[in-house]
Image: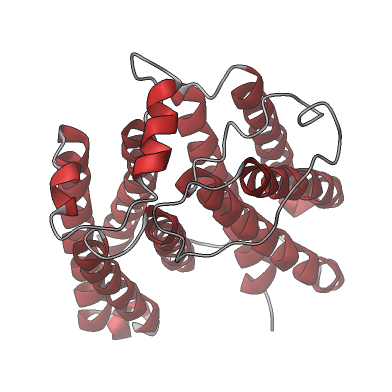
Amino acid sequence: MYLKLVLATCLLAFVAVVFSAYARLSDAGLGCANWPACYEENALKERQPPQADAARDHASWRWKLQNMVGLLLGILGIAVCGLSWQKRRELRQSPLLPTLLVGLMAFMAAFGIWAFSHLPRSVIVPVHLAGGSATLILLTWIALRQMAPVGEVGADVMQSLRRFSLLGLVLVLVQIMLGGWVSSNFAALACTEFPLCKGVLLPAMDFSYSLDRYGLPLSVEKLTAIHWMHRAGALLTLLYLSWLSFRIIAVGGLHAIGNAILGLVVLQFVLGISNVLLGLPLTGAVLHNAVAMLLLVTLVLLNFRLQKQKK
C-alpha cells in the first residue's frame, strides 16, 4: 500500500514537472500564430516590473490544470508522510524524508502564491524547476528504499563508482538549472546554428547579469552568453555521462542502468540540437524537459544502487 502510494506520487510529480514546462513554454509564446514575434514580445513584457495583479496572466486552462495537479500532488505527499509516521515500525525506516518532502511542497506552494505578483520570471522559473527536481528526487529515493535489492555489485566497484555517479547527478542538476535560466530569460533563440553560434564558436558575449534591470531587455550579448553556457554544459554533460555509462555497462549488476543513461543522454543531446535547428518547436522543448527528468531519475537510481549495499 505504502509503496504503491509513493510510486503514484512519484509518477504524478514527473507529470507535474513536465506539464509545468509545457505551461511555461506555451506562456512564453512557443507555437503561437505569429511565431517568433510573440516570443520576442513576451520576452520584453517579462522584463517589466511585476504588478500586484500579475497572477491574472496565469488564468489560462494550462495554469489552472497545473494548479490542480500541484494540489493533488500535495495531498498525496501529505498522505505519504502520514503513512510513513503511522507505519514507521512496520516500514523500519525513518519518516524524515517524507517529512522533508511535505516541507518542500509547502514552501513551493507558498512561493508560487507570492512570487507571481512580486518576482520576475527569471527568478520564478529556476526556483520552481529546482523545487520540482528536488521533489522528484526525494520521491524516487523514498520509493527505492521500499524495493528489494536487484543484482549484486562488488564493494570495490561501488567504492570506485560512487563519487563518479554523484558527480554525474550534480552535473545533470546544474544543466537542468541552466536550461531553466535559458527559458526564463527567453534566450533559447539567441543562437540558431549548430555547432556554431552566430557563425563562430565563441561569439561576442556579456556574462554580466542583474535581476534589477526591469524594463530593459537583455542585450544580444547577454542572451548569447546565457545560451552558450547551456550549450557548453550540455557538451560537458554528454562527454562525462557517456564515459560514466560505459564504465557502468561493464558492471554486471548495473548493465541496464548504464544503457539507460547512455540512451537518455544521447537522446537529450539530439533533442537539444533539433530544437536549435528547427526553431524551438513546442513539442521538442517539452520533450527536452521530460527526458531531462528521466535522466535525473535514472541517475538517482544509480546513486541509490551504489549506496544501498554500503556496509
Tell me which residue sits at (60%, 59%) in the image: 173
Pick whichever, 120 or 27, lies toward us.
120
Is residue 301 visible in the rendered structure shown here? no
272 vs 17, left or right, is: right
Q: In which quarter of the image is residue 238?
A: top right
Number of marks drawn: 0
Q: Quadrant of residue 288?
A: top right
Pick whichever, 51 or 150, lies toward us.
51
Farthest top residue in view:
33
**The N terminus - image quarter:** bottom left
Counting from the top left corner in percent of width and height, residue 235 is at: 79, 43
Q: How is the image coloured?
A: secondary structure
**The C terminus - image quarter:** bottom right
Is residue 87 visible in the rendered structure shown here? yes
Image height of 114 relative to 202, above or below: below
Tell me which residue sits at (44%, 24%) in the image: 282
Counting from the top left corner in percent of width and height, residue 77 is at: 25, 65
171 vs 288, left or right, is: right
Pick whichever, 182 or 133, lies toward us.
182
Image height of 202 relative to 84, above or below: above
Tell me which residue sits at (45%, 32%) in the image: 286
Counting from the top left corner in percent of width and height, residue 275 is at: 59, 25
Counting from the top left corner in percent of width and height, residue 54 is at: 19, 52
Q: In which quarter of the image is residue 75?
A: bottom left
Image height of 60 relative to 2, above or below: above
Image height of 21 relative to 124, above or below: above
Farthest front residue in view:
216
